[in-house]
């Protein structure tokens, strides 16, 4: 287990020498913090709680409206890559006469065939791809459009790019 070393702010000023003791503290303190060493600051439990689904927009994956009239097979219309693990809500804000397939790593999680705002909550890991695929009801319905797609969470600490 690494030892926690308190550093005086005065010893870190530009005119102060860089010593091996300071270098060792820079190397060991993050480990001591993670291990909960004596004297190290404690990490709050909330900091280790993964984000949950919520209504805070964390990424806009598509902002325009796409016409899907005549589309008989699913088309990928929005995608994002997960940067922080947790639960993300993938939202299709507005759609008319469109089947929506919410996917994680190209595997369907939820298919919704109703109009209006629709969403699916997904448990995700770092590096997962989340996406929305869509097609017109029966491929021929007029109009068949889908608008904004966004990712939401209960905290801005969740990240999707």
Image (cartoon, helix red, strand yellow):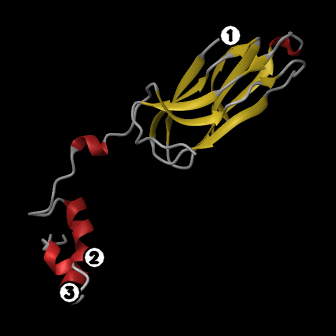
**Residue at the disc numbered 3:** 16
**Residue at the disc numbered 2:** 27
Q: CA distance from mark 1 to mark 3?
A: 65 Å
Kind of element beneath mark 2: helix
Residue 115, labelled with which disc? Answer: 1
User: Measured from the top left, where is residue 43 in percent x and y?
Assistant: 21, 51
Q: Is residue 158 above or below residue 35?
A: above
Residue 12 placement: quadrant: bottom left
Kind of element beneath mark 1: loop
> 10 Å neighbourhood of mark 3: few (<14), some, or many (≥20)?
few
Q: CA distance from mark 1 to mark 2?
A: 55 Å
First in sequence: mark 1 vs mark 3? 3
Residue 7 placement: quadrant: bottom left
Pick the residue in front: 54 or 137.
Answer: 54
User: Measured from the top left, where is residue 41 in percent x and y?
Assistant: 15, 58
Q: How many marks?
A: 3
Q: Is 10 displayed left or right of 87 in the figure?
A: left
Q: Is residue 93 above or below residue 125?
A: above
* Residue depicted at x 31% and y 40%: 49
Residue 81 placement: quadrant: top right
- Report the quarter where the N terminus lies: bottom left
Q: Is residue 66 above or below residue 83?
A: above
User: Measured from the top left, where is residue 111 in percent x and y?
Assistant: 66, 20
Pick the residue in front: 61 or 11.
Answer: 11
First in sequence: mark 3 vs mark 2? 3
Q: CA distance from mark 3 to mark 2?
A: 19 Å
> 10 Å neighbourhood of mark 2: few (<14), some, or many (≥20)?
few
Which circle, 3 or 2, is nearer the viewer? 3
Q: Is residue 10 visible?
A: yes
């Amino acid at each position: 287990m690494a030892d926690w070393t308190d550093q005086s702010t005065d010893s870190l000023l530009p005119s102060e020498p860089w010593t091996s003791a300071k270098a060792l503290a820079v190397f060991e303190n993050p480990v001591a913090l993670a291990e909960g060493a004596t004297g190290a600051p404690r990490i709050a439990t909330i900091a280790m709680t993964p984000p949950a689904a919520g209504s805070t927009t964390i990424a806009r994956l598509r902002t325009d409206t796409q016409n899907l009239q005549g589309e008989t097979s699913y088309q990928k219309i929005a995608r994002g890559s997960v940067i922080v693990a947790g639960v993300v809500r993938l939202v299709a804000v507005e759609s008319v006469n469109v089947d929506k397939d919410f996917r994680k790593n190209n595997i369907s999680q939820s298919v919704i065939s109703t109009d209006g705002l629709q969403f699916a909550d997904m448990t995700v890991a770092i590096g997962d791809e989340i996406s929305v695929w869509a097609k017109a009801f029966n491929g021929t319905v007029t109009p068949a459009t889908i608008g904004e797609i966004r990712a939401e969470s209960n905290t801005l600490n969740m990240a999707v790019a």
